[in-house]
Amino acid sequence: MKDIATPSRTKEILAKYDFFFKKSFGQNFLIDTNILENIVSYADLTEESCAIEIGPGIGALTEQIAKRAKKVLAFEIDNRLIPILEDTLSPYDNIQIVNEDVLKADVEKAINEYLPNELDIMVVANLPYYVTTPIIMKLLTEGLPIRGIVCMLQKEVADRISAKPGTKDYGSLSIAIQFYTHASTVMTVPRTVFMPQPNVDSAVIKLVKREEPAAEVIDESFFFEVVRASFAQRRKTLNNNLLNNFSHLKKDKAILEACLLEAGIEGTRRGETLSIQEFATLSNSLYKQVKVK
């Protein structure tokens, strides 16, 4: 049987099931086997690896993962695709499809049920572009036993995720994800390999979980609050953004001045110039002044 990810086979499957694409699910199916094989290769799967997939569609990527992994656990929100997946993936006995929205699913429970005691788990996915960030943050903040994530997403978002300090793409999203992972953009993907073709360019990112977060912070939620505030208006300085977003500081500007001095950071700098470590040092200093007192 030929691979699912060809234009002719994809059209054949869609016609057989009278399937139509729903914009609300952000459905764009890949129709290039070489691209899929490259995506899977970046996950560094072995015969002992397991994979979690999100949004398998008609099974094009799932099939390529199943050829290399011990087990595949896939979350599909669209119940119309379940019988299609049962058909297209019938040659493989190492795939478990869960008909759930991954954002609402108890992923840890599913891992314990379908991938118990597995030591090497990677997420490999062609993510729906409209919910890319919430899905990635859910996977990284729930303490799941995963090694990392290899996923396709909108190129603009991939650029922001892997951006370095001092660049135009660097922002709160870069910091949120690089706080937990080593992030890199590993390949770009042309629009022509999708059905239907999306209106944006795509890229594949690789996120490898850090053993420990990139910096030591007293309170993670406050750290991210400081980061978001620092980028509230990109063209404004740290002084302006932090004063405008923290009422305590606006009432007593001397607190911010003291914290910046303690952190060794000039208040005239913009958020995009600070490293994760600098944000951690600043947020820890602010936490002691604003939250503890």
Image: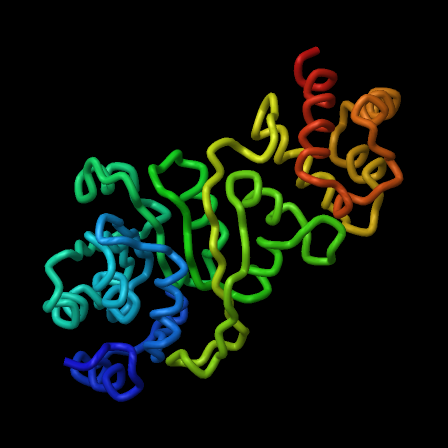
**Quick check: 290 left or right of 84?**
right
Q: Residue at x 31, y 56 (%)?
A: 53
Outermost residue on the bottom side: it is: 8
Which quadrant holds residue 85? Answer: bottom left
Image quadrant holding the N terminus, namely: bottom left
Q: Is residue 122 above or below residue 15?
A: above
Looking at the rendered structure, the number of numbered marks drawn on it comes to 0
**Quick check: 153 left or right of 162?**
left
Q: Residue 281 in the image: x percent, y percent?
A: 71, 27
**Observer-nearest residue: 226 or 65?**
65
Q: Is residue 241 above or below residue 68?
A: above
- Its colouring scheme is rainbow
Q: Residue at x 77, y 48 (%)?
A: 233
Image quadrant holding the C terminus, namely: top right
Q: Residue at x 85, y 41 (%)?
A: 269
Which quadrant holds residue 78? Answer: bottom left
Q: Residue 164 in the image: x percent, y percent?
A: 67, 51
**Observer-nearest residue: 70 or 174?**
70
Q: Is residue 106 visible?
A: no
Q: Residue 166 in the image: x percent, y percent?
A: 76, 51
Q: Residue 237 in the image: x percent, y percent?
A: 84, 42
**Quick check: 157 left or right of 94?**
right
Q: Is residue 156 visible?
A: yes
Q: Is residue 178 above or below residue 84?
A: above
**Observer-nearest residue: 33 or 169?**
33
Q: Residue at x 24, y 37 (%)?
A: 109
